[in-house]
Image (tube, rainbow, N blue to C red):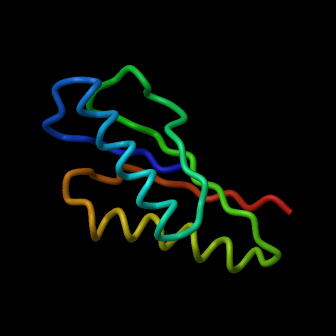
């Protein structure tokens, strides 16, 4: 789960454009599944669910940590407020 703040957004249409762009890019960069899972009707907030299947818990953990770092480094238009990673065996 990655909780995001989207400063300066004034409509749901603008928010959805940013979220769609971000989820598509995460899929291409890291081969993860990604979708908005909460805060659907709030303009400046989004919560993304990011998932990966792997035979190695360490690999999955690493990829998910890299997705968060990538957002922080490459998307100055969004702020990561909080994130959590859960590994299911």
Left or right of residue 76: residue 49: right
Image quarter for residue 58? bottom right
> Observer-nearest residue: 11 or 7?
11
Image quarter for residue 64? bottom right
Q: Residue 29, how many percent across, how many down?
A: 47, 70
Q: Residue 83, how many percent across, how many down?
A: 49, 54
Residue drawn at (58%, 67%) of the image: 31
Q: Residue furthest top?
A: 41
Residue drawn at (59%, 61%) of the image: 32
- Note whether 83 is above or below 47 in the view shown: below
Image quarter for residue 56? bottom right
Left or right of residue 1: residue 42: left
Q: Quadrant of the C terminus?
A: bottom right
- Note whether 10 is above or below 79 in the view shown: above
Q: Residue 75, how many percent across, how many down?
A: 26, 60
Q: Residue 35, how many percent across, how many down?
A: 53, 43
Residue drawn at (53%, 70%) of the image: 30
């Amino acid at each position: 789960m990655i909780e995001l703040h989207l400063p300066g957004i004034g409509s749901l249409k603008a928010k959805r454009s940013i979220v769609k762009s971000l989820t598509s890019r995460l899929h291409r960069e890291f081969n993860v599944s990604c979708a908005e899972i909460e805060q659907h009707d709030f303009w400046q907030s989004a919560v993304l669910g990011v998932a990966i299947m792997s035979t190695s818990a360490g690999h999955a953990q690493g990829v998910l940590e890299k997705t968060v770092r990538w957002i922080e480094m490459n998307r100055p238009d969004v702020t990561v407020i909080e994130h959590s990673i859960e590994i299911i065996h």
